Image: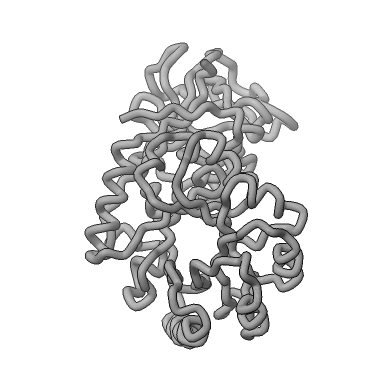
Amino acid sequence: MRPTVMEVNLSDFKYNINSIKKYINSDVLLMPVIKANGYGTYLNLSTILDEFKIVCVALVDEGILLREKGYKGDILVINQPDISEIDEIFKYKLIIGLSDEKFLEEMVKFDDKFRVHIEVDTGMGRTGIRDLSLVNKLKNCPNIIVEGIYSHLSSADNDVEFTDNQIKLFNEYVEKIKDIFPDIKYIHLAASNGIINYPTSYYNAVRVGIIMYGYESFSGCLEKLDLKPICKLKSKITFLKEVDEGTPISYNHDFITKRKSHIATIPIGYADGLRRALSNRGHVVINGNLCPIVGKVCMDSIMVDVSDIECKLGDEVYIWDNDLIKVEDIAKECNTINYEIISTISSRVPRVFIR
């Protein structure tokens, strides 16, 4: 196996699920969001999902992959699919988030039954209905089974007034839609930020996202909820060299050694999802020491200055170890968010499940 791997701890994942259940302290159903290959963890390939009654994905293809891997529970595609995907939606028994009337018009041409959750736009401004015209059409669609209502909170981490208004508007939609479809099975609004900050947004189900994987959904999140990060990204030293003062390192020689140095080469680069923005500013952990990345991050490798530590070929190198370097630290260096750092580690990095 390639020395560069993402280590995914399934025991810590279960710990987080139990911690979230205790925090909610109710019978609210957890709907794990495992889009983007489980936020880059590849938990969508693990049998651990069999413990859940329903899971959420973003794409029809993600739902198909789950079915092909043997998941038998309900799969909700939360993004409005494309009309060209209707055949596959039926074939793989997927539930869809519905907000487009043209999509509905195509579905009713089939004799097959489809299960849907109605998405309403309460302020996210992405997808979702903004009036009841689609709902009224659904009354006359016997092959469409309405099982849910949902929306998405856009600012539950930083805007109380806006979020309260979203919850108020969602309540109004729910009341009106339940007048037409009184036997709605799932009502869900809260994702990670809503779960932590707005108990009034729970209803009978919540969509658990990044907190399930043990990472902050906003700064300060971990002060409210006890979580364990489930992933470590690591590699090994595959080449070591001693170089003189004045030696250029990597492309465009924008790093030049200021002393006689020991430089380690690590086989991970931007094609693996390690950001080029970490060139000459990021660090890795080797034998419990922070070591600076020197020179530009290459497609397949980085160079690290190990002049001040003891190390050898084959020593483990942590890109993040959740201790000396956290995912949030890397995100800050790259001027982005932890979601992006985790979810964009590429498929050529093997995932290793541990307990």
Horizontal and vertical percent for residue 96?
59, 60
Is residue 186 at all visible to an observer of this figure?
Answer: yes
Q: Which of 211 and 87 lies nearest the eye of the viewer?
A: 87
Measuring 52% from the left and 26% from the top, which residue is drawn there? 350
In the rendering, at what x and y percent does residue 232 appear? Answer: 41, 35
What colouring does the structure picture have?
Answer: one colour
323 with respect to 97 (left or right): left
Q: Is residue 37 placed above or below 30 in the rendered structure?
A: above
Which residue is located at x 60 percent, y 35 percent? Answer: 346
Look at the picture and state if 289 lies above or below 331: above
The foreground one among 173 and 306 is: 173
Residue 218 in sight: no
Question: What is the x, y in percent for residue 69?
Answer: 52, 34
Quadrant of the snapshot with the C terminus:
top left
Seen from the viewer's position, the closer of residues 189 and 110 is 110
Look at 41% across and 38% down and name the residue there.
231
Q: Residue 119's image quarter?
A: bottom right
Judged left or right of residue 197, residue 328 is right
Q: Which residue is more in the foreground, 40 or 190?
A: 190
Q: Position of residue 72 (x, y in %)?
A: 46, 42
Residue in the picture at 38% in, 75% down: 201
